[in-house]
Amino acid sequence: MTTPTARETVLGRIRDALALAPAPDTVIPRTYRIGRTLPDGERLALLTDRLVDYRATVHPCTADRTAEVVAGILNERGARRIGVPDGLDERWLGAYDGEVRRDSADVPAPSLDALDGVVTASAVSCAETGTIFLDGSPDQGRRALSLVPDLHVCVVDLSSVVAGVPEAVARLVPERPTTLISGPSATSDIELERVEGVHGPRTLAVVIRTDA
């Protein structure tokens, strides 16, 4: 007879306890403050303020200048080889003359480290917290693509920017994988010194299309 591991013993005791204890009737309050709105200018200003505070760079532009602004960011950062989700709008890269690699599930995640950067779209953004949500849609790609390269250029339509977290969550599809981005990846070491790029891109550039 095989001796159970400590993990199996602990989990078994938890299962036994749950089976013996009747499940209480619990009502979860859902009285969130929802439906808040802000004018376009205020949403843009608030999101920009939060992102800059998180040490991201923000580049507002009209939709017809998307390709120009994206190329400018990539060239300024010296990004000559970038990855993009397979469903990204090709017009956004029309002014970029570097190498573009379309991502797919067949591309090994470790190989993404050879990229200088990545360009993605976004699902929704929360102005109040400065958080950008990616949901794995074709123009946003898999999570590894937005986490491994050192530079992330994220295109945000102002029409997808909402006031608060409840309004943002309401726009998401629960079954889709969600990645939340609030500035470049950063953490602190044991001496509370800020260290960037440990868990994701060291640099986040956000292109906000003000008329889209």
Image (cartoon, rainbow, N blue to C red):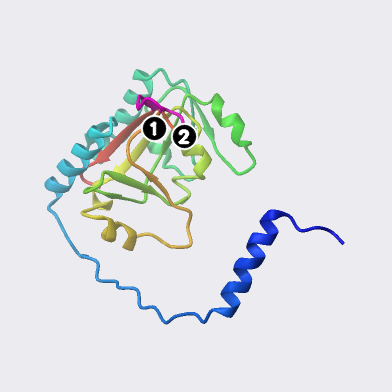
Q: Amino acid at mark 2?
A: His
**Can you tell which quarter of the image residue 201 is in?**
top left
- Please check the rendered image and state whether residue 191 is part of the magenta-colored stretch, yes or no: yes
Q: Position of residue 101 (x, y in %)?
A: 54, 32
Q: Position of residue 55 (x, y in %)?
A: 28, 30
Residues marked 2 and 1 touching at CB (< 8 Å) = yes
Q: Circle 2 sits in a helix, a strand or a loop, which is it?
A: loop
Residue hosting label 1: 187
Say which residue appears at 33% left-offset and 59% top-offset.
169
> Going 23% across and 33% down the picture, which residue do you hit?
52
In front: 195, or 94? Answer: 195
First to last magenta residue range = 189-198
Residue 209: x and y, percent? 25, 41
Spatial distance from mark 2 to mark 1, Cα to Cα? 8 Å
Q: Amino acid at mark 1?
A: Thr
Q: Is residue 60 magenta?
A: no
Residue 113 position, x and y percent, is 55, 27
The main secondary structure of the magenta stretch is loop
Q: Secondary structure at mark 1?
A: strand
The image quarter containing residue 196 is: top left
The residue positioned 40% from the left and 25% from the top of the image is 96
Q: What residue would you read off at disc 2?
A: 199
